[in-house]
Amino acid sequence: MLLNKVQNVFWIYFFACVFFMTGSSLLASDWVPLISRKLSDNWTTKGAWTLQDDGVIHLPEREYKHWKNYENYLVLKDVSVTDFEIDFDWHTSQNSGLYFHIPDLSQLQDRNHKEVQLYENSLWSKPELGDHAAGGIIPGHAPKKNASKPAQQWNHMHVRCINNQITVSINGEVVNRADLNEDAAGKRSAYGGFAFQDHGYAVWLKNIKIKILDEDT
């Protein structure tokens, strides 16, 4: 009898451990760094993005300035998700953005994705922040505050999106929370890949990492 009880306790403990470990792996991945020795390990681009020796990805400023430089975007390879966290440091001479939920990476011009705006807010001239200010979510969700550092200083951004509920933090302060199932954003894809925008302005990126939160990964 005692032996049977010990065996029963063992199997209960064993299956509990298996369930716990399996459940944990389904709920979230570990943080995955997205900058390695070669830019081409994780990213693809036909543009002027380069990986410097100090681990910074840099895009130099050029004369042609327009967000329709689609083929020159910095596109993350082989990652398409619904739920995620992404974390990175950045600054820009004026304008860039993190595109997410891109349904077809070869068709950026379809504008069926969403974007977290990267902007040099010292250049913002309007009395109220709009969705094109730093931390804005395009389309339609302006940040609640300006938490960006002065020009040419590094900013830290953290984006968490679960079930199209998104939170954007800059330098440790929450600047935006939005339900992307509603309004104009709700008409766009809720699943897909990632890219950084080439708007013709200089961009610096470092310490990029992602955590995939989809339950089936």
Image (cartoon, grey):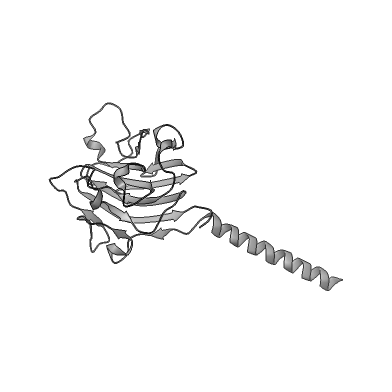
Considering depth in this image, is 107 or 146 the residue closer to the camera? 107
Answer with left or right where residue 172 lies relative to residue 133.
Answer: right
Answer with left or right where residue 90 lies relative to residue 178.
Answer: left
Q: Residue sitting at 47 percent across and 59 percent down?
A: 30
Q: Which residue is most to the bottom?
A: 3
Q: Residue sitting at 36 percent across and 42 percent down?
A: 112
Residue 176 appears at what percent x and percent y? 40, 37
Residue 191 seen in this snapshot: yes
Taking 143 as reference, is 54 above or below it?
below
Taking 87 as reference, is 131 above or below it?
above
Give the number of marks.
0
Considering depth in this image, is 201 or 143 the residue closer to the camera? 201
Residue 154 seen in this snapshot: no
Residue 168 appears at what percent x and percent y? 40, 42
Q: Which residue is most to the right?
A: 1
Q: Which residue is most to the top?
A: 127
Q: Quadrant of the N terminus?
A: bottom right
Residue 130 appears at what percent x and percent y? 31, 31
Q: Residue sitting at 23 percent across and 64 percent down?
A: 53
Answer with left or right where residue 213 lies relative to residue 207.
Answer: right
